[in-house]
Amino acid sequence: MSDFSLIETLRFEPGTGFMRLRLHLARLTRSARRIGFAEPRHALDELNASVQGATGALRIRLTFDAQGRIEVTTAPFTPLAPGTVWSIRIASTRLDSADKLLRIKTTRRTVYEAARAEYTPQQADEVLMLNERGDVCEGTITSVFLGDASGILRTPPISCGLLAGVLRTDLICQRKARVGRIRLDDLHNAQIYVGNSLRGLIPARLVI
């Protein structure tokens, strides 16, 4: 458990601050406890220091390792243009639903990188992954949601082998999303969204 770091990727907006900060810090703390890392006590201080004097939107990446070290990097953030729809494809790379580390955001990303490498950026904006049972799990950098006539989004359960995404948690807490298994065939009959805390919900279309 010492060969990787925990990651939180946040969006900062001047005048608004860090989006979903409470949920990011809660996930970081919960993840650290689950794998035996120290408490990330200074994470908020490091985040605040990283945005001093910021005048534009930022992408913030925080890592926390087994030795208790925190590193924060920042980069300018440009939101997607209104009306953007991402093209998504299905990876042949599979996730193992028994792998508990898939539920925690870490720098151990080999399986996600392998899935992303199956298609060029021109072929797909995002690549979705299934588990060994054929359940839809998540994208390489996003959670998956399906919309229907009920107005409530459906998103796969963590037990399928996927990350507890912060946007996903936020939407479930707001009762804008509910947990339910998604099969590959379901993607043909509903509005697809992918998203994360950095970019929010993004409409998507499946490319066969």
Image: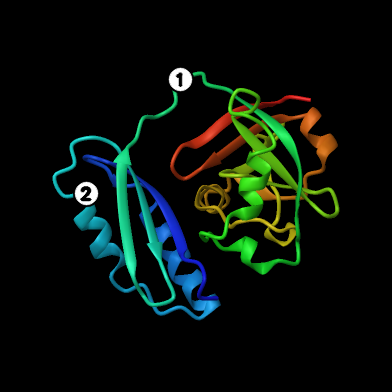
In the foreground, 54 or 27:
54
Residue occupying the point 44% across, 26% down:
80
Image height of 124 relative to 182, above or below: above
Q: Position of residue 77 (x, y in %)?
A: 34, 35
Instruction: Tell me the kind of residue under disc 2.
Output: Val
Q: From this viewpoint, which residue is outermost toward the left?
A: 53
Q: Amino acid at mark 1?
A: Pro
Look at 71% across and 32% down and name the residue there.
89
Q: Is residue 197 left or right of residue 130?
A: left
Q: Position of residue 101 (x, y in %)?
A: 62, 66
Residue 51 circle label: 2
Q: Is residue 153 visible?
A: no
Q: Residues within 10 Å of mark 2 (few under 14, many from 20)?
A: many
Residue at the (49%, 77%) spot, across then down: 33
Examine the rendering and report whether any part of residue 48 can be seen.
yes
Identify the mark at residue 82; answer none if there is no mark. 1
Q: What is the quadrant of the N terminus in the image?
A: bottom right
Left or right of 15, for residue 191: right
Q: Could you say whether the residue bearing mark 1 is in a helix, strand or loop?
A: loop
